[in-house]
Image (tube, rainbow, N blue to C red):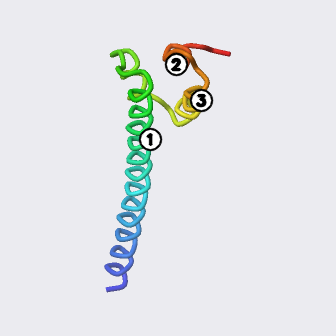
Amino acid sequence: YERSLKYYRDLKNVVDTAWDNGWEKGNEEGLQKGEINFFTKLLTDRFTSLSDEIKLLLTQATPEQLNKWRERLFVAKTIEAIFFDER
């Protein structure tokens, strides 16, 4: 009985940990997609359309890149200045 109980507790801990880690990762990915969608909306409001290259960059963006691009959005005169100007 005690071995079964220990096995059950160990298995439950593994499942709980996996669940928590999956939940956190899914939540982070969801937030990232929301940020990308919002940023895309801001870009299309300002510059009308996005090239396929820009769309690809957005889908592959890291949080750091998004922050850098977001800072440039309000001062850049062109969409290229947001994504390709490495100051």
Query: What kind of element bears circle 3?
Result: helix
Image quarter for residue 52? top left
For disc 2, the marked residue is 83
Identify the residue at horizontal 61%, vertical 31% (top origin): 71
Inspect the image, locate mark 2, and give the three-letter code of the amino acid beneath it.
Answer: Phe
**Tag 1 or tag 3, which sits nearer the N-term?**
1
Q: Residues within 10 Å of mark 1 (few under 14, many from 20)?
A: some
Callouts 3 and 1 close, C-beta under 8 Å? no
Describe the element under mark 2 as helix, strand or loop: helix
Task: Residue 28: give x, y in percent of width and height.
Answer: 44, 49
Q: Any mark on residue 68, and which?
A: 3
Quick one: 13 or 66, which is closer to the camera? 66
Q: Which residue is mark 1?
A: 35
* Camera-side residue of 56 and 4: 56
Name the image quarter holding residue 81: top right
Residue 14: image tag: none
Choose the circle earlier in sequence order: 2 or 1: 1
Q: Please give the name of the residue rendered at 40% of the width and 45% of the height, measured from the top-left corner.
A: 29
- Marks 2 and 3 sit apart, C-alpha to C-alpha, by 9 Å
Circle 3: residue type: Lys
Q: Amino acid at mark 1?
A: Glu
Instruction: Determine the CA span between mark 3 and mark 1.
Output: 13 Å
Q: Residue at (54%, 20%) from the top-left corner?
A: 82
**Measuring 38% from the left and 41% from the top, which residue is drawn there?**
33
Are there few (<14), some (14-19), or many (20+) residues within 10 Å of tag 2? Answer: some
